[in-house]
Image (spheres, rainbow, N blue to C red):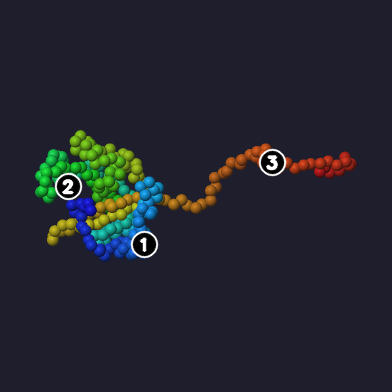
Amino acid sequence: MQTRYNSTLRVNPTYPQAVALINWAKDNKTMLLGSPSEKTSATSSISPMIVTPAGQQLISIAEISSAPSMGMFYVEAEMAILDEFQDFCVLECSGCKQKKRTKDRKDFECPKCNRKTSLVPRCSFQIDLIDNTATTTASISAELGEKLLSMTAEDIFDITCTKRQSLSLTHVHEMLSNKVFEIQLRKSSWGNSNTTNATLSILSYMEKQHTPDSTTDRTPKKIKPLETGDVEVMATTATAGPSNAPAK
């Protein structure tokens, strides 16, 4: 299992999300233990099953500060990059993934890996979350960050570190403008006996889909002229009689 340098692994956690997932797995044990070959194949067009945290309660950004020091939360908020001059990538050891405070990619002796290794760039930056209660800052990294910026970590490093230029974020601002996202956050804490700091990390995000109002469509409709074949022709007859008789 690939982890980050500050990862925490917990066995049988008592988080409500974990308990709900365990109960779901027990209820669907037969389906989960089924042979994959019976359901899908390499050429199957069936989408993989995705377990979503259905029924999870949304929390406002203002409430996050009073939430437990560790845990996962779900918010609906706008996203914006207010600090355009921050470092959008870091260098980390290709073996242990530990961050290094340098912008030099030369090979080095990693004390944790006990071998000579290289540094690789990894996308990592701060993004602001805004809802109608407050504003907060969270970190976003790896593939999520690359997707948001529409560029790879290698491209980011080349622009910001090698060429020493600023990233152009115009397309990102346009993409995020006036949109609300459903965001999964992880709150963690770190520090010493004297001070404790809390950080927020984005685990996933998805644009919230707005359901259109079910109103009557009052747009004027064009009347299609009848074709010749659509006209019902009624036969008419005339009978002999006085000239002032009503015509049929």
The amino acid marked with disc number 2 is Gly
Q: Earlier in the sequence, mark 1 or mark 2?
A: 1
Q: Which residue is mark 3?
A: 231
Which residue corresponds to the image point at 65% horizontal and 40% vertical from the top-left?
Answer: 226
Q: Earlier in the sequence, mark 3 or mark 2?
A: 2
Which residue corresponds to the image point at 13% horizontal and 49% vertical from the top-left?
Answer: 113
Q: Does 192 sit above or below residue 239?
A: below
Q: Are marks 3 and 1 in contact (CB under 8 Å)?
A: no
Q: Does 239 sit above or below residue 29?
A: above
| Number of other residues with Cα within 10 Å of mark 3, as a class: few under 14, some 14 to 19, many 20 or more | few
Q: Which residue is mark 2?
A: 95
The quadrant the C terminus occupies is: top right
**What is the secondary structure assignment of the residue under circle 2?**
loop
**What is the secondary structure assignment of the residue under circle 1?**
helix
Residue 126 at x, y percent in the picture: 24, 47
CA gap, disc 1 to disc 2?
38 Å
Q: Does 70 sit above or below residue 92?
A: below
Residue 80 at x, y percent in the picture: 30, 46
From the viewer's perspective, is 231 left or right of 11?
right
| Number of other residues with Cα within 10 Å of mark 1, as a class: few under 14, some 14 to 19, many 20 or more | few
Label 3 or label 1, whichever lies nearer to me, is 1
